[in-house]
Amino acid sequence: MSMPLFCKLCRLSIVALLFFSGATLTVSAASRLQQRMVEIYNETEPAIVRVKAAFRDTSRSDNERAHVTLRVGTGFFYNREGHVIVNASRAYGADRVWIEYKGQAYAAEPLGHDRLTNISVLRVLEPPDTFGFISLDPGVPRPDIGSLVFTVAHSLDFDASPGFGLITGIENRLGVQIFPTHYLRSTISVEVGEGGCPLLDINGRLIGITVASIPEIGSSYALPTDALIRVRDDIVNFGEMIHSWMGFEVGERDGSRDQYPVFLSKIIADTPAYESGLREGDTLIAIDGRKIGGVADVPGAVFFTRSNQNATVRVEREGEVLEFSVRTLPRPQRDPLLLPRGEEEGEIPVGVSPQDMELLVE
């Protein structure tokens, strides 16, 4: 039995246990849960679109027949102006991008991309007369592990379909690979055409967008809504996500059981960190209020700072807690990315892959 099928059967077993436990109260609760799932689907489906992007093979000579690769995924409207959020693995570098909504095709143009988080924003040139949208609310709390979550996505050539699962982790790394921020891991298996679908809580609120699959265990990662808003804002304003940089490197004390084991291992000369007064050896406590409990927490804290603005860095030095105001800069191109470059899709960590449907058109 394949892992995705096994995981789906597990989710069906959860519902079966709710319905057939023999307790009248439990059956009533299961009935309410089923009704809520139907409501979430009906509320969300009007905002869901199928995304298609065409990529022409430019390596062929003029007298050879051109090959076009078609990538298909899911996206969703997030405002009344007809802006759509999709995975960058669908739209980045495409010769043409469009959406399909209620059986009709609509031309779209990319406003920008961030390959590190696998997010693109599209503007539909002439949106449908009526459509729904999913609000991006930064105040929605991140779910607890074990919480029920829901998706609505276009699988293959089917209409938008619902799915559900559980949150199984909130993680900032996979093995040795450090993520740009914390990701939500769920039991929802993102199949062909479903990448980029919204992740919703039991109240129907957006808690993230699927950005990568973990095919070995039939699971997926989602970028949380607060991080999605951070990326969206930069793309809309600047055409790309501008990742911040302060000019320090960090290390973690081996075997340390301290609450804050991370220290500044290097301060680069003539950088914001250097000019602010930070010193090598300072114990890193927090960045803009986000506590640092390990090296993997640092990229996520820096992720939410904004370039050319001041960030507060709290450290401990010789037993004294100090705060420094550091004016961040855009991350230099020479600075290494936090995730390795995928073979063709961008910065996706080893063992995690975006789900594309690719068709070769002669």
Image (cartoon, grey):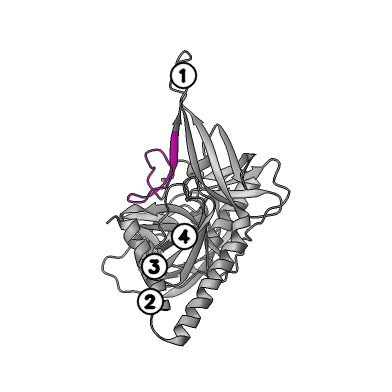
Residue 86 is covered by the magenta coloring? no
**Earlier-in-chain disc, 2 versus 3:** 3
Nearest the viewer among 104 and 174 is: 104
Q: Nearer the viewer, mark 3 or mark 1?
A: 3
Residue 346 is covered by the magenta coloring? yes
| Residue located beneath label 4 in the image | 300
Cα distance between the residues tagged 1 and 4: 46 Å
**Label 1 sits on what residue type?**
Arg
* Residue pictured at 53% horizontal, 37% vertical: 53
Q: Residues within 10 Å of mark 3 (few under 14, many from 20)?
A: some
**Label 2 sits on what residue type?**
Leu
**Earlier-in-chain disc, 1 versus 4:** 1
| Mark 3–mark 1 CB contact (< 8 Å) | no
| Residue located beneath label 3 in the image | 12
Which residue of the protein is positioned furthest toward the right in this rendering?
129
Q: Tell me if I can see residue 217 in this picture.
A: no
Q: Which image quadrant for residue 175?
A: bottom left
Q: Residues within 10 Å of mark 4 (few under 14, many from 20)?
A: many
Q: Nearer the viewer, mark 2 or mark 1?
A: 2
Cα distance between the residues tagged 2 and 1: 56 Å
